[in-house]
Image: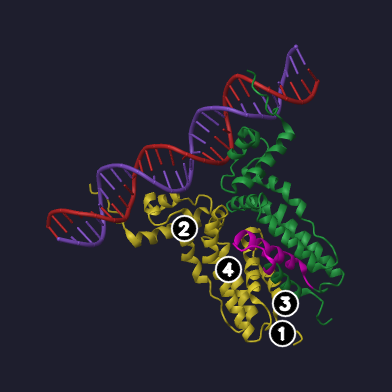
Chain colours: A yellow, B green, C red, D purple
DNA sequence: AGTTTATCGGCACGTGCCGTGCCGTTGACA
DNA sequence: TGTCAACGGCACGGCACGTGCCGATAAACT
């Protein structure tokens, strides 16, 4: 009557990986509600210590889990048409932000961050500022190629673009659809675009 | 040895008012963390039932508390200079959103809303959409007076303006300072303003 | 090979909050 | 004065957080 060996009990980095994956799986299944450390532990068949040994808090775990799936979607294309590249990227971000597992995990981080200004700073550094920077990079290239006005201050433009996206997907209840993206890009191009304007 | 009568035990609407005020006071003192129904009850010297009899959930209480202090700051001025009116209003909103008691209560609602889509819808209806609408009203007037381009679709502009504001004050860690407001208004006026442009 | 040692899963604890039930009291209103 | 709903206080079960302790186990060292 030997018990089935089941999965061998892993340790170290392998376990860390499994835990991040379990967090994402759990988020996809049950959403933000029920996304607790205890639930992650139960799902991964793991004691809470195994989690707390790796991350000092629930927020830290969530941030790492988010990194795991978020970074791959960050890059803008560069087809030479800045409006089209932004458009494509905004849709991708919008879908990502409103689908599991990214949506629930992002929401969980935001909820957690409301009561913890240090976490809010980390969220901003690791995610929001990064996205803004990539946006700024892309539109700065467009400025150099003459697609956007040379004198424009694009730093705030990048923030406004990202802000509109996150506002709609995380605070509002409206989807990031064609109308929203086109409306946003209309405003952006009307402000800074060179095509069809004097000059 | 008669006990001091202290405050007479009030009932009904008077108590409701006291409870909302206690919620705001507590938020101002301890911030979002510690803003629990039990804490509100303790502070107001009230049993939890007295709260739950009035509001079905913590979120409902927070929304009502927020209404109590938020609505007064909603109105835009109309001096005839749309940029200046927006500027003044954005500063006021920025200060309100980052000061007690509005800041902590708003954060609490947002945190709560991340796990409750019905609450998110209510938050949007009662607050975000209202602010967007007043913004839209103001810039629509500006469109009629010729300050803004007649063909502009201002609905998305209103959302983008508000989105930038809320993004910065609630998700980002940066303050709503002169640079931010001016950068935002530069973009807005460059897109839709008529002054200094052809036509 | 055997021995050590850190990591592991499991369990229990104390704290805090949620939302509900009960109970004796109190204030408003008839 | 009497009635009755609203009240404050208390306790409960449930859940999650973060920590402490246990014996088991896998990896590293000898």
> Label 1, label 2: how many angstroms apart (C-alpha)?
45 Å
- Farthest-out residue, right: B145
Report whether residue B88 is seen: yes
Q: Which residue is mark 4?
A: A93
* Numbered badge on residue A191: 3
Q: Residues within 10 Å of mark 3 (few under 14, many from 20)?
A: many
- Tag 1 and tag 3 share a subunit: yes
Dot 3 lies on which element?
A: helix
Q: Which residue is mark 1?
A: A195
Q: Nearer the viewer, mark 1 or mark 4?
A: 1
Q: Chain of mark 2?
A: A
> Label 1, label 4: how many angstroms apart (C-alpha)?
26 Å
Dot 4 lies on which element?
A: helix
| Circles 3 and 4 in contact, beta carbons < 8 Å | no
Q: Chain of mark 3?
A: A
Dot 1 lies on which element?
A: loop
Q: Which residues are magenta?
A: B152-179
The earlier-in-sequence mark between 1 and 2 is: 2
| Circles 1 and 4 in contact, beta carbons < 8 Å | no
- Tag 2 and tag 4 share a subunit: yes
Q: Quadrant of residue C28?
A: top right
Q: Quadrant of residue B89?
A: bottom right
x, y (%) of residue B161?
Answer: 71, 66
x, y (%) of residue B45?
Answer: 63, 33
x, y (%) of residue A176?
Answer: 64, 66
Q: Chain of mark 4?
A: A
């Amino acid at each position: 009557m030997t018990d089935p060996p089941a999965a061998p009990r892993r340790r170290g980095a392998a376990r860390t990986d499994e835990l991040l994956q379990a967090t994402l799986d759990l988020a996809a299944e049950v959403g933000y509600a029920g996304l607790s450390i205890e639930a992650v532990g139960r799902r991964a068949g793991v004691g809470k210590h195994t989690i707390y040994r790796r991350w000092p808090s629930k927020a830290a775990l969530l941030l790492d889990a988010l990194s795991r799936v978020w970074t791959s979607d960050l890059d803008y294309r560069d087809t030479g048409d800045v409006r089209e590249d932004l458009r494509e990227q905004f849709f991708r971000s919008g879908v990502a932000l409103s689908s599991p597992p990214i949506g629930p995990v992002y929401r969980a981080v935001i909820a957690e961050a409301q009561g913890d200004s240090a976490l809010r700073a980390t969220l901003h550094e690791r995610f929001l500022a990064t996205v803004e920077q990539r946006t700024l990079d892309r539109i700065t290239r467009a400025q150099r190629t003459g697609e956007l006005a040379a004198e424009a201050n694009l730093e705030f433009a990048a923030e406004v673009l990202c802000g509109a996206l996150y506002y709609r997907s995380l605070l509002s209840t409206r989807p990031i659809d064609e109308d929203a993206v086109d409306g946003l890009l209309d405003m952006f191009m009307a402000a800074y675009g060179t095509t069809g304007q004097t000059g």
